[in-house]
Amino acid sequence: MDLYRLFSTCLYIPYEKVGVSANYKTVKKEGVLYLFFEDSDGKTDWKNNLDFPAKAYKRMGKTVWFAHRGFLKVWKELEPFIAPAVLDKSVSRVVIAGYSHGAALALLCHEYVWYHRPDLKNALEGYGFGCPRVLWGILSPAVRKRWEKFTVIRNLDDFVTHLPPAFLGYSHVGSLLKIGKKGKYAPIEAHYPQNISKELKEYQNKE
C-alpha cells in the first residue's frame, strides 16, 4: 500500500457531511471500496474529541467492549450512511483511512466491516494516521483480532497518538507503524499533516 498517496487522498478528497459533524467519503473502484474519514473540522469535533469517558459498544451475543464516547457518538451518526456501501456484495476489498479524529472513526469503521462482511476479513485494510487511542479496558484476544489488519501510523513524538492517556485504561489495537525520528519535532508539530506526509515519503523511499 502506498501510504503517502493514501494519506494525501485522505487530506484533500472532498468530504460529505452528515449529522451534526460527521465527515466521510466513499469511493468505489473496480470492486475496491475506499472509505475516508476527515480530521477535526470545527468546535463540535473538538468537543467530541474531549468527550473521552468510555461507553459500551454492544454486539450480538455476550461480546461487549468499550470505546471513547465522543468518537463512538460520531461513528453512530455515520453508520447508516456507510452501511449500504459496505453491504454491497459487488465489493471484493475494503480500504479504510482516516487522519487524527478521522483515524478514530476509521478504527471503528474497520470493526464494522469486519463484523458485517465476514467474507472480506482477508481483504480488509485499515489505516489510522495520527490515530488517538479509542478502545478502553482489557480486550479479549478474540475482540482484538477484529483489528489485526488495522495499522496505527505514528510520527514519533506525535502527542495525539498518546491520547487519551494509557493510565486511564485506553490502548491502541492492531499494529503500530512508527515513522520519523524521535526528537525531530515538538509533540504538536509531529501531528501536523505536512510533517506526517514528509515522514511517510521518506519512510517509503527507504523501503
Image (tube, helix red, strand yellow):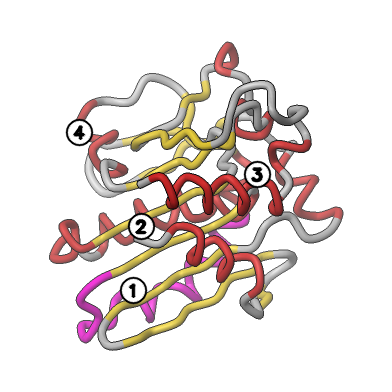
Left or right placement of residue 160 versus residue 144 in this view: right
Q: Which residues are magenta?
A: 74-93
Q: Where on the picture, by quarter, is residue 75?
A: bottom right
Q: CA distance from mark 3 to mark 4?
A: 24 Å
Q: Which residue is mark 2?
A: 112
Tell me the SS state at disc 2: helix
Rounded to the nearest whole Å, what is the CA distance between mark 1 and mark 2? 9 Å
Contact between labelled residues 4 and 3, with CB atoms less than 8 Å apart: no
Using the image, determine if residue 144 lies above or below residue 95: above
Q: Is 7 covered by the magenta stretch?
A: no
- What crowding class fits label 1: few (fewer than 14 Cα within 10 Å), some (14-19), or many (20 or more)? many
Residue found at x 73% / y 31%: 185
Residue 128 lies, in percent from the top left, at 49, 48
Quadrant containing the N terminus is bottom left
What is the quadrant of residue 161 in the picture? top right
Q: Secondary structure at mark 3?
A: helix
Residue corresponding to mark 4: 142
Q: Amino acid at mark 4?
A: Ala
Task: Give the alpha-carbon distance from disc 1 to disc 4, as whole Å.
Answer: 22 Å
Q: Which residue is mark 1?
A: 86
* Numbered circle sitting on residue 70: 3
> Which residue type does callout 1 highlight?
Val
Callouts 1 and 2 close, C-beta under 8 Å: yes
Instruction: Name the side, left or right, on which 21 lies relative to 33.
Output: right
How far apart marks 2 and 3 lie (CA) works out to 17 Å
Q: Residue at x 44, y 21 (%)?
A: 137
Q: Nearer the viewer, mark 3 or mark 1?
A: 1
Crowding at mark 4 (Cα within 10 Å: few <14, some 14-19, many 20+): few
Return the residue nearer the eye: 139 or 31.
31
Q: Is residue 70 left or right of residue 40?
A: left
